[in-house]
Image (cartoon, rainbow, N blue to C red):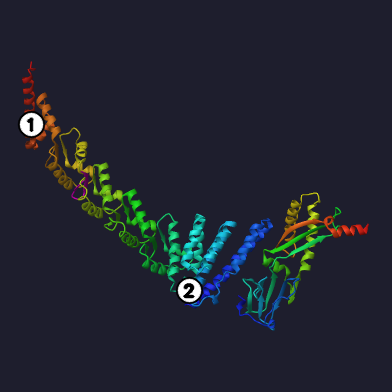
Amino acid sequence: MSTIVRSELESYISTEQMVISKRLRGIIAEAIKNREYDLSTSLEALVSSIRMFTPLKSSYTRPMDYINALRSYALALSIISEMLGEVHIGKDVIDLCKRILDLAKEGLPVGKIADGARELLSGMGEAGNKIFINGCRKYVNILIGKVKELDPQELQIIKETVKEIIGHVERPYARISDISRILGTKEKDLLSILKRIAGKDPNIIVTKSIITIKDKMKDYLEKRIRESHYMLIGDLAREWSVDIGDVLEVLGEVSDIYPGLEVFEGIVISTMKSLSDYFVRLVDDEMVTSTRFIATKMGVRIDALRKILVRLHKYSPDIIMGDSEIVAHRQKICDWLRSIIGDRAKVYVEEFSGRLGVSTKVMKRFIEDIARMYGEFVLAKNELIYVPNLSRNILSEITSRKESSEVRDIIKKHPDAVEAEIFNNINKILKEFEEKISRGSVK
Amino acid sequence: MCFASTKPKFSEKDYIMPPRDPDTVIFYYEIGKKDVKCFRVAEYEDAYIICPSGEIKPIGKPGFYQIISIPAKIIWIRSSRFVLSVGVPRGVLPGGFGVNADLSLYLQYPEIFIGNIITAEKQGKISIDDIRKELRKLLENAVRNLQITPEMERRKIVDLVHGEMNNLISRTWLNGFICDVQSVGFSFECELSKLLDELAR
């Protein structure tokens, strides 16, 4: 295998030298034509350095040392070739080329050259990153597909290149097909290499379609969850253009470093806290709502949401649920009932169930619970009696001596509920009268 | 690829190389069936091979090479820089003064140049004199076109001649080269010219 590597690298170095020399020849000629003699002289010196830039086989005692040197020289030439094609050639670029050539001449291994070159190119900003990626891409192409076992340093270069690619897309992941297109390799070959890299580097996650960096993905998910409280697995799969299985695989890996991150019922990704906050905020706005409404708003299956809500409401004291169909805010439930009741003393349960779009049976059970918690509501059969309004009506009947049909109806149907209120009101009137007498204000 | 690198040969009979003549700037040779297949490229030369398919392949670095498929034509071009002094006599130019210039050439497009010089002959060469003759014609035309006078600033004269020479060179068999005009002088500045004038009087 080392023979294949050696011959591939030797041939690459020789071709690359010719390509660079030809390119520089054109630039030198232009410089002479424009009478920029300083530039042409520097470029001529660079051309001669590049023409002689080959490791001497006789200088190495072991064949592997020679192959390692070839690797270093090939990567340096690859980056220089990209740089000369990408940027305007000036003294600074020539100086940079010489420094990259020196890295290889110093006998540094290929991984160190990649690091050194990246550091040198970082001063050029976005162009520098592009040069580094394309330089590595060319180098990687010499070997990928031709050699099965790559050197650990070459794996490192591929890793660095992929990291650069992922680092310069807006999203913290990249499709393997996209990377293979950028690198110009076969997707299958690249995937097997990336899997080997992921096996050695726990920060890299590789699935059958995408590659991502764990900490970057964590930051991305954190940001998204902070903004929208939750994400749907289906949406992520669509956004990343991958199978749901790939998304779940990535999330499973990321959860190692993201405490609390959870996939709820296989459809919603969030943390317990963020999702609870979302529901609390939602019922805070709506006061009382139905699971169906929330499911539609979130775009999830109702049965799955029921399970999520049943689990979460135990941890959110502000949320109360009715038969996993109704979700309400504990402090606002009475306001909601009052807003529907208005001035009336009794309202049929069907009106509440109709408002929410839930079954009367469920609504009745829910109101029963509420009536048990708050004394101002009394549920009698399928009618909710609002005691303060009833009391007001009774008082008005006593003082005005005019019969109210609503009070009569309630007395007829639910005498127990009315009786207490009559006594309360008579007591109230007597008390008021007593106070007036004791103050001596009765005329 | 119609050639490959090979081991060095020690006898000059075993390889082909340009004649050891300092006046030869370009030399080409077609390697046929009966020729030695090995050739040498020295460190002061650029070499190109026209393969049987017609492709022009540059040879990246000095060394010994073996022709794999024949017939192939090898072109050696001297890469070391040389400065040519070219003069146009007073009698040829209007204005009553002769012009001389120091020029050097730089090969920008080898493929174009090779296409201009290659002939059907098995071998051929271009010497410094051939190039000088062509450059003299070019200098004459450039001076005529520019209508320069000795009163003009010298730096400007050099710039003008440089630009015009490069315009004109692309229309000659030297197309592919860039001409670098280093200096321009006039006949009345030359000691020999002054002496000849006095003798003539």
Q: Which of the two discs, 2 and 1, labels the residue nearer the N terminus? A: 2
Tell me if residue A284 comes above or below residue A427 in the rendering. below
* x and y, in percent, of residue B9 in the image: 64, 81
Tag 2, which secondary structure?
A: loop
Region in magenta? A319-329
Q: A256 or A376, which is in the foreground?
A: A256
* x and y, in percent, of residue B43 in the image: 66, 72
Residue type marked 2: Lys
Other residues around mark 2 within 10 Å, as few (<14) / some (14–19) / many (≥20): some
Tell me if residue A412 comes above or below residue A110 in the rendering. above
In the rendered image, the quadrant that contains the N terminus of chain B is bottom right
Q: Pick out the residue farthest to the top.
A: A443
Q: Pick out the residue farthest to the right.
A: B201
Magenta segment includes A378: no
User: Is residue A79 shown left or right of residue A333?
Assistant: right
Tag 1, which secondary structure?
A: helix
Question: What chain does badge 2 belong to?
Answer: A
Which residue does the image show at 34% across and 53% down from the upper left?
A222
Circle 1 sits on which residue? A424
User: Is residue B53 shown left or right of residue B190?
Assistant: left
Circle 2 sits on which residue? A146
Residue type marked 1: Asn
Quarter assignment of residue A235: bottom left
* x and y, in percent, of residue A342 in the image: 20, 34
- The dominant secondary structure in magenta is strand
Magenta segment includes A323: yes
